[in-house]
Image (cartoon, grey):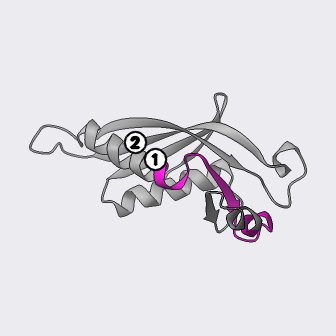
């Protein structure tokens, strides 16, 4: 099995509903996503995928959806307030935890046709969540 990984950094804000602790308050992070692709065989160019293509797709998706956005759960009352004030927000079905965002990026990159093996989502330099499908 061949694997490659591409990492992209970005800034975002969020808060968690129904949580008691620092993350119940609106705050920001400098996050990072590592996308890992896997293939049993290499393509005609002798690659799993071109790093430039993978990086561009990941960065494009993160820039459009997470970078410099406030990421909030759809039932967060602050979502409407911020949108009404013209603030860029990204709405999630569940609380925007690192685990949930790793899963979200995993499936978004799969939709783009990449052979995704796993996604690692760093909320901080010392806190990382991983999502991968068990096969």
Quarter in which the C terminus is drawn: bottom left
Q: Is residue 110 above or below residue 77?
A: above
Q: How many marks?
A: 2
Residue located farthest toward the top when viewing the structure as drawn? 125
Q: What kind of element bears circle 1? A: strand
Residue 134: tell me if it is visible: no
Numbered circle sitting on residue 118 = 1
Name the residue beneath numbered marker 2: 36
Residue 12: tell me if it is visible: yes
Residue drawn 54% across the image and 56% down it: 103
Quarter in which the N terminus is drawn: top left
Q: List x then y, in percent, for residue 10.
A: 54, 39
Q: Is residue 105 left or right of residue 89?
A: left
Q: Earlier in the sequence, mark 1 or mark 2?
A: 2
Residue located farthest toward the right when viewing the structure as drawn? 20
Residue sitting nearer the eye, 79 or 83: 83
Instruction: Tell me which segment is drawn in magenta.
Output: 63-80
């Amino acid at each position: 099995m061949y694997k490659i990984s591409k990492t992209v950094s970005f800034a975002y804000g969020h808060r968690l509903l129904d949580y008691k602790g620092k993350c119940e308050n609106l705050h920001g992070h400098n996050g990072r996503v590592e996308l890992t692709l896997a293939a049993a065989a290499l393509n005609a160019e002798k690659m799993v995928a071109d790093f430039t293509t993978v990086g561009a797709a990941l960065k494009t998706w993160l820039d459009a959806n997470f970078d410099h956005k406030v990421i909030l759960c759809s039932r967060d009352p602050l979502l409407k307030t911020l949108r009404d004030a013209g603030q860029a927000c990204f709405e999630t079905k569940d609380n925007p935890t690192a685990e949930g965002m790793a899963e979200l990026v995993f499936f978004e990159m799969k939709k783009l046709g990449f052979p995704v093996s796993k996604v690692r989502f760093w909320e901080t330099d010392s806190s990382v969540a991983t999502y991968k499908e068990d096969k």
